[in-house]
Structure formats: structure tokens, C-alpha cells
Image (cartoon, rainbow, N blue to C red):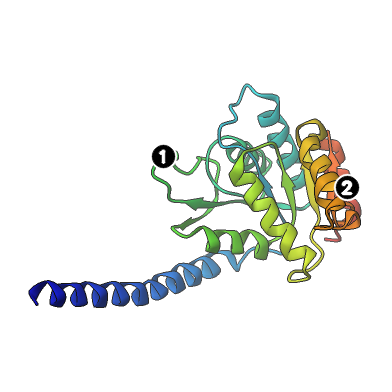
Amino acid sequence: MPEVRQNILDDMTSVTSESWRTFRIMAEMVEALDKLNHLSMNCISIFGSARATPDMQVYKDAEQIAAMLVKKGFGIITGGGPGIMEAANKGASEAGGESVGLHIELPHEQGCNAYVKTRCNFNYFFIRKLMFVKYAMAYVVMPGGMGTIDELSEAFVLAQTGRIRPFPMILYDGKYWGGLLDWLRGSMTEGGYIKAEEVDRLVTVCDTPEEVVEHLCKIVIL
């Protein structure tokens, strides 16, 4: 009987803990909204690999894209970490523009980069992704790994299903993203799981910083 009683108490503790977690989620969301509500609605979210280094061309391109966008009147939002995120925040900060970092607390990730001017810390990925979508008017998706694809697919589904306003998504470096696009337009489209026009409507491929800025200035009205 003592064992049964302990199991019941453990279950009750677990339920209570899960219930209180909702308040931690709410608190994190309210704090983020309070901190970011000052942003003008002209920010661009830039994603890409945390493993990119300053000597890599993709790092330099991200830095240039951010700086050029700032000079056109845009603000920059990143995940606040190293790699492409650091490059974009650096470009935005040194150009004198809004440089936002939505930093997630991870056990094996480096801390927030030094070029973030407005920083939000997150424990929950889904709240962080909500802030990316809420405060950005477009995505620039640089080469990256599964985290980058996760952010891209989240925004794609929201736009595809009409849950958010039309949302431009630029994939940078057609050579890098070509395999994914071939699969979407091939296997997925041929299987009837997606429409080719959805891909063409939501996704644009650019290969130079100038193309990115020109495209965004053409379709986004500040």
C-alpha cells in the first residue's frame, strides 16, 4: 500500500507541475511581447547555420544583406546566436539599424552574439518561432541545417494555410536549396501532397545580396 500511495502522490505532483508550466509559458510570451512591441513592422528575419564562420562566403553575404536592408529602412531579426545569426546582427548593428536577437537557451549552443541590440531569451522554441513570424514581414533563409529548415517550414505552412498574411520567403543560394526545391516540385507535387504553384508563390530563390534587397524592396512597402 505505501508503494501505491507514493505512485498516486507522484502522479499528482506531475499533474501540478504540468499545470504550473502553463504560467511559465504565459510569462515568457508576455515578456517577449513587452520587449518587442516597440519594433516597427518593417523587420526581416534572417536564418541560417550557427556553424558558419567569418571566413566563409555565406557569413559575409549574410552580413552584407543585413547592412543593405538596414540602409533601405528595414530592421533585422535573428536567433541571436553565432554563425549566420551573428553575421546578420553584425551587419545590421554596424549599419546603425535595428538588430534583434531571439536567443534560445540550449545546453550545447554558444551564448548570444555581441551585435544584438534588442535581446529576448527563450526556453520554449514554439514561443520563439511565434515571435519570428509576428514581428517579421519576410524571411531570408540562408544555408543551414535542420533548425533552419524548421523555421522555413513553419512559416511556409502558416502562409500556405492562410493563417498569416502573405509572407515572402527568400532562399539564398539556389545551388544549396536546389535539392529541396526539386523534391518539393517533384516527389511531393507528383504525389499530390502539395501544389507546384504554392511553392512558386511563396518561395523565391536569390543568389546575391543585391538580388535579395532588390526583391524585398520591390514587394514590400515600408
Q: Which quarter of the figure has residue 6?
A: bottom left
Q: In the image, is residue 215 above or below residue 198?
A: above
Residue drawn 26% across and 74% down? 11
- SS under mark 2: helix
- Of the numbered discs 2 and 1, the one sitting upstream in the chain is 1
Left or right: where does residue 5 sit relative to residue 29? left
Say if residue 72 shows up in the picture.
Answer: no
Q: Nearer the viewer, residue 173 or 150?
A: 150
Quadrant of the snapshot with the C terminus: bottom right
Q: In the image, is residue 114 above or below residue 196?
A: above
Residue drawn 72% across and 65% down? 158
Number of numbered callouts drawn: 2
Cα gap from disc 2 to disc 1, whole angstroms: 36 Å
Which residue in the protein does label 1 denote? 108
- SS under mark 1: loop
Residue drawn 65% across and 45% down? 47
Q: Residue furthest top?
A: 55
Give the residue type that dot 2 points to.
His
Which residue in the protein does label 2 denote? 215
Q: How far across and how far down the image is residue 50, in percent? A: 56, 37
Q: In the image, is residue 207 above or below residue 126?
A: above
Q: Nearer the viewer, residue 199 or 85?
A: 199
Q: Nearer the viewer, residue 6 or 99?
A: 6
Mark 1, Cα crowd under 10 Å, few <14 / some 14-19 / many 20+, is few
Say if residue 94 shows up in the picture.
Answer: yes
Q: How far across and how far down the image is residue 178, in percent? A: 81, 36
Give the residue type that dot 1 points to.
His
Q: Residue furthest front?
A: 1
Q: Which quarter of the figure has residue 39?
A: bottom right
